[in-house]
Amino acid sequence: MKLTRRHFIGALGLGAAGLGVDGLGVGGLGAPRAFAAVRTDAAPGLLAKARAALDAHGAKVPHRDVVGLVDFAAPSGKPRFQVIDLGSGRIVSSNLVAHGRGSDPANTGFVQRFSNEPGSNASSAGSFLVGESYVGKYGRSRRLHGLDPQNDLAFDRAIVIHSADYVSQTMASTSGRVGRSFGCFTVSHSDIAMVLAQLGPGRLLFSAR
């Protein structure tokens, strides 16, 4: 049976209601050890926008213990993908993340534009519902469902969280930027397991510039 994005969003509240992050129990028993390493320098403006997005989307985002923030105003050589503990406002982890080729045609390391258009190879801004895991071309990945008019084609465009060779701390240190994706939120191989464990299904990923 083919499931639509609407069917998936409706089922998330039921299927994931009793789970923590990916069944690991973030916010309760069995929380990943990475939650012990926290900082408190989350961008307040971006976090405030994410909280407003949670209010705007209501029950579509059933789990509100953590949120993913991507600050596309920062260069790609900086760890601009943060997972935030909403209870304390503290940063759980900071990670490098690529933006789309279509968002930075000259490969400057900075996002120049967003797009929701298929074939644009660009990043999109806005609220994303974090979906299920799968194993694809880039290994273990996680689907995303756009909740706003400016990103509502994310699922159809196959915009996901995955890892790739073109995102690494070595590249960021030597070049001041990492490589570009086709619009996906691409992190390093060393970070992908932690990111997927911390930001499980039914949670919000919010990106802006």
Image (tube, grey):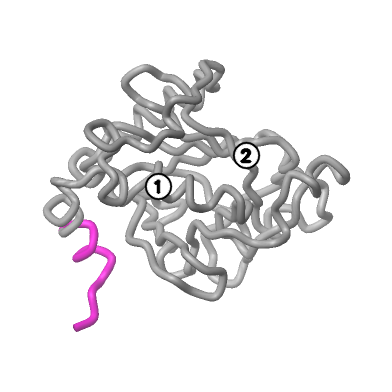
Could you say which quadrant of the image residue 5 lies in? bottom left
Residue 148, x across and y down, in percent: 38, 49
- Between 16 and 10, the one lying in front of the other is 16
Amino acid carrying label 1: it is Ala
Distance, label 2 to label 1, CA atoms, is 22 Å
Residue 91 shows in this picture:
yes
Considering the numbered disc 1 on the image, is that residue within a helix, a strand or a loop? helix
The residue located at (11%, 53%) in the rendering is 14
Type of the residue with mark 2: Phe
Closest to the observer, 205 or 187: 187
Q: Residue at x 40, y 31 (%)?
A: 50
**Total number of numbered discs in the rendering:** 2
Is residue 2 in the magenta section?
yes
Which residue carries the number 2 mark?
72
Residue 209 appears in the picture as rendered: no
User: Do the CB atoms of the residues marked 2 and 1 lie less than 8 Å apart?
Assistant: no
Q: Nearer the viewer, residue 177 or 21?
A: 21
User: Mostly what secondary structure, the magenta segment?
Assistant: helix
Residue visible at 40% across and 61% down in the picture: 143
- Binning the other alpha carbons within 10 Å of mark 1 as few (below 14), some (14 to 19) or many (20 upward) gives some
Q: Which label's residue is closer to the chain start, 2 or 1?
A: 2
**Boundaries of the magenta span:** 1-10
Q: Could you say whether the residue bearing mark 2 is in a helix, strand or loop?
A: loop
Q: Does 41 appear above or below 138?
A: above
